Each structure stands twice: as structure tokens, then as C-alpha cells.
Amino acid sequence: MVKLIAIYKQPEDQEKFDEHYFNTHTPLTQKIPGLRDMKVTKIVGSPMGDTDYYLLCEMYYDDHESLQKAMKTDEGKASGKDVMQFAGDIVTLVIGEEVHVEKVH
């Protein structure tokens, strides 16, 4: 399983960000072919207190090939264009592979 992770820093206007993110951007992203799951986490703090981060979105794909193919679709391009327009200055995108670690007893 491969995931595209979007990490957003604190927006200037949280209400305006949420309005666009949940009502415009999320529906665009959910239409991307090959997207298996999408998990959104609102960042509420850190063990040290405040944090610069606001939101984390994990978008799951079967493999790297599926992710690359998805990004080239019209839906993938629309989502990418939208995120750059409304949050290009506060978003970081990374690709990750899940690693399962056995719990130590």
C-alpha cells in the first residue's frame, strides 16, 4: 500500500480553509480513479503544546504505479491544481509506504 500524504500548516483563516477543503477540495480528490481510501486528521496539538500543523490527509493507492497513473488523470490534475491555488503556500506533499512493525513485548 502506497499513500500520498498532504500536510497543511496553519492557514491564516481556518474557517475559510475548512469551507474550501471539505466542500470543494475533498469531493474533487475523492473522484480520483484508483484512490482506495482517504483519511483526514485535524491536528490539535503536539506533546510539546502548540504546533505549526493544521491538517493531515492520507490518500491510499495499491502501489506506486497506481498513484502515478491517478495523478495523470483529469481528476488527479484537477485536485492538484485546486490544492496549489488554495493552499500552495502551506501544503507539503510526500509519498510513503506503510511499514508494519511487530510490537515488542
Image (cartoon, rainbow, N blue to C red):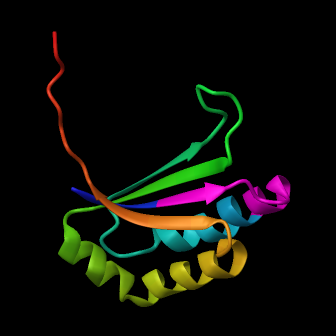
- Quarter the N terminus occupies: bottom left
**Front one among 14 and 91:** 91
Q: Is residue 80 left or right of residue 69?
A: right
x and y percent of residue 69 in the render?
A: 27, 83
**Front one among 5 and 60:** 5
- Quarter the C terminus occupies: top left
In the orientation shown, which residue stands out farthest toward the top? 105
x and y percent of residue 40 in the render?
A: 53, 49
9 up-or-down from 63: above or below: above
Quarter assignment of residue 21 = bottom right
In the orientation shown, which residue stands out farthest toward the front? 48
Residue in the picture at 66% in, 33% down: 45
Q: Is residue 49 magenta?
A: no
Q: Is residue 12 magenta?
A: yes
Residue in the picture at 61% in, 58% down: 8
x and y percent of residue 44 in the render?
A: 66, 35
**Front one among 33 and 6:** 6
x and y percent of residue 30 in the render?
A: 47, 66
* Magenta stretch in the rendered image: 6-19
103 up-or-down from 29: above or below: above
Quarter assignment of residue 24 = bottom right
**Front one among 40 and 96:** 96
Residue in the picture at 76% in, 59% down: 11
Residue in the picture at 53% in, 78% down: 79
33 up-or-down from 23: above or below: below
Count all numbered tags in the image, as a single digit.
0
